Image (cartoon, grey):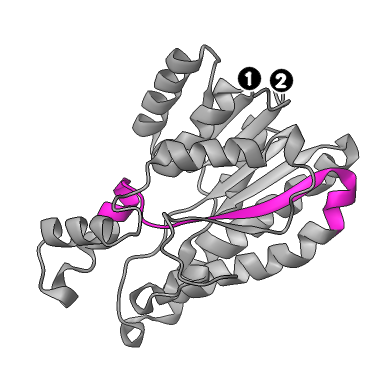
Amino acid sequence: MDLGIAGKTALVFGGSKGMGRACAAQLSSDGVQVVIAARTVATMEQAAAEISAQTGQPVRWVSADITTDAGRDAALAACPAPDILINNADGMSPGDFRTWTVADWHAAIDSMMLGPIEMMRRTVDGMMERRFGRIVNIVSRSVKTPQLELGLSNGARSGLVGFVAGLARQTVRHNVTINNLLPGVFATDAQRHHILGMLESTGKTFEQLWHERGTNNPAGRYGEAAELGALCGFICSAQAGYITGQNILIDGGSYPGTF
C-alpha cells in the first residue's frame, strides 16, 4: 500500500531504539526523510546507519532532549519544518506514590506532557500552512487501564491525552491530524526496565515476571516494536486524514472494556 508520504519529512523523538526506532524505520521505508532525536549519540549513530542500510534512505540524527528548550531547539534546527512529528518519551520507573517528590512529578510532566506539547506548539502552525501534518504521540495503555505503580506515567500521559483532545479538533480541517498510540506490553528495553523496577515489590525474579506479563496477555505474547511501527506508518499516511483525536490501543486485547 502506497501511504502517499514519500518525500515528506519526519522528526522522531526516541527514534534510536524500541518503538520509536520502529516508527522511524517504517517511515523511512515509506520514503520519508527521517531525523531521529534522542540523548545518546552512540545508539543514534547505530540506529541511523542500520535503518539507512535497511531502507535505502538516508536517516539523520540529532542529540536532543525533549524535556529542555535547548533540546527542542536542537531538534528543530536539524528538522526545521517537519511534516510528521513523533513524540515518544520513556516512562518513569514504577514506585509508591508516597515516596515521590514534587521534583519527581515535575520530571514526569516535563518528559511525558510538556515536552510533547511544546513540540506541537512549535510545529503545528507550519503544518497547517502547508496543508499537511501528522502528529503521533506514543503514550501507553495506562491512560485507559491505570496501574498503581505507574502513577507518574498515568498522570502525566493523561494530561497529554486530554490536551490533544482539544487541539486535534482545531487542526484537522487543515489536514493536520493528532493521534495517540497506546501500546500494551511490548518486548522492548522500556519493558525490561519496568520489570526491573517491580522486582523488590513483588519478590519475584525478572524471568518470572517477564514470562507472566507475556503469557497473561490475551495474545499470549509480547507485542513486537515493528507492529507498532506499522500502525504508526498508517496513521501518518495520506489516507488517514479523517482520523484525529483518537487514542488507539495496540495491546493484544488486554484492555477489558467494550468502549
Expressed as whole percent of the image width and height from the top left, the position of residue 210 reads: 20, 56
Q: Is residue 216 above or below residue 30?
A: below
Which quarter of the picture shows residue 164?
Answer: bottom right
Secondary element type, mark 2: loop
Badges 1 and 2: C-beta atoms under 8 Å apart? Answer: yes
Tell which residue pokes out farthest to the bottom in this image. Answer: 98
| Residue 191 seen in the current view | yes
x and y percentages locating residue 170 in the rendered image: 86, 58
Number of residues whose C-alpha sits closer than 10 Å to that of mark 1, classed few (under 14), some (14–19) or many (20 or more): many
In this view, the residue in front, 173 or 38, is: 173
232 left or right, relative to 154: right
Q: Does residue 10 lie above or below 51 as drawn?
A: below
Residue behind mark 1: 31
Give me the residue at 33% from left, 76% from top.
149
Residue at x 69%, y 21% (from the top left corner): 6
The residue lying toward the viewer, choosing from 214 and 131, is 214
Q: Which mark is residue 42?
A: none
Percent position (x, y) of residue 111?
Answer: 51, 60
x, y (%) of residue 142?
A: 46, 68
| Amino acid type, callout 2 | Gly
Residue 101, image quadrant: bottom left
> Counting residues from the N terminus, which is met first, the one under dot 1 or under dot 2?
2
Q: Is residue 234 magenta?
A: no
**What range is drawn magenta here?**
170-192
Q: Residue under circle 2? A: 7
How many C-alpha atoms fall within 10 Å of the one at disc 2: few (<14), some, or many (≥20)? few
Residue at 41% x, 54% y: name it.
Answer: 252
Residue type, mark 1 in image: Gly
Does residue 146 appear to the left or right of 132 in the view shown?
Answer: left
Q: Secondary structure at mark 1?
A: loop
Quarter occupied by the N terminus: top right
